[in-house]
Image (tube, helix red, strand yellow):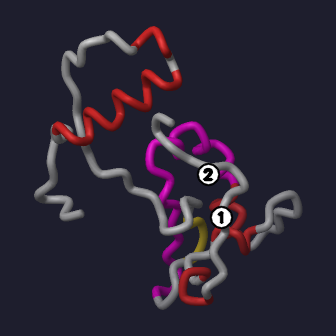
Amino acid sequence: ADPDRFQTIPSHEEAERFAIRAARRFPALEDATLQSGYAGIYDVSADWQPIIGPMPGIEGLYGALGFSGHGFKLCPVVGELVADMVLGRETPAIDRDLFRADRFARGDLAPSRYAYNIIG
């Protein structure tokens, strides 16, 4: 998606698809009327897992990205994790390798055992 040019309202087809799925999950919504909607860019990594740690090829640059909306609730522990990385401290309870930026180049994605979906 082009971040400078994307649809800010759902298409008729998208609205219909989500309405059908919402009514399937919540039968009381079957006769509901759509009042409005919005659309945006859902910024997640290719495997839907965050990228946390040093950025390849840029000495001293650390990142914490690719969370989309759920990064806000994780920020306390992610802040501690990045601080530990920068300061060279160990984090035995967290497997840092799962979140490395170079996992995509290695072909070692970290898919979740849970299926993610907005509605459905």
In the image, taking residue 67 as reference, residue 7 lies left or right, namely left
Closer to the N terminus: mark 2 or mark 1? 2
For the image shown, how many numbered marks are present on the structure? 2
Q: Tell which of 20 and 105 is nearer to you.
A: 20
Disc number placed over residue 79 in the picture, else none = 2
Is residue 96 inside the magenta stretch? no
Residue visible at 80% across and 60% down in the picture: 94
- State the quadrant of the N terminus: bottom left
Residue at x-position 52% and y-position 61%: 64
Q: Is residue 67 left or right of residue 103?
A: left
User: Which SS class for mark 1?
Assistant: loop
Tell whether position 65 is magenta: yes
10 Å neighbourhood of mark 1: few (<14), some, or many (≥20)?
few
- Circle 2: residue type: Gly
Position of residue 28 measured from the top left corner of the image (x, y, whole percent): 45, 9
Classify residue 5 by image quadrant.
Answer: bottom left
Q: Secondary structure at mark 2?
A: helix
Q: Amino acid at mark 1?
A: Pro
Residue at (62, 89) in percent of width and height: 106
> Which of pointers 2 and 1 indicates the residue nearer the eye?
1
Determine the CA span between mark 2 and mark 1.
22 Å
Q: Which mark is residue 111?
A: 1
Q: Position of residue 51 (x, y in %)?
A: 55, 66
Q: Which stretch did the figure color magenta?
A: 58-80
Between 70 and 61, the one nearer to me in the picture: 70
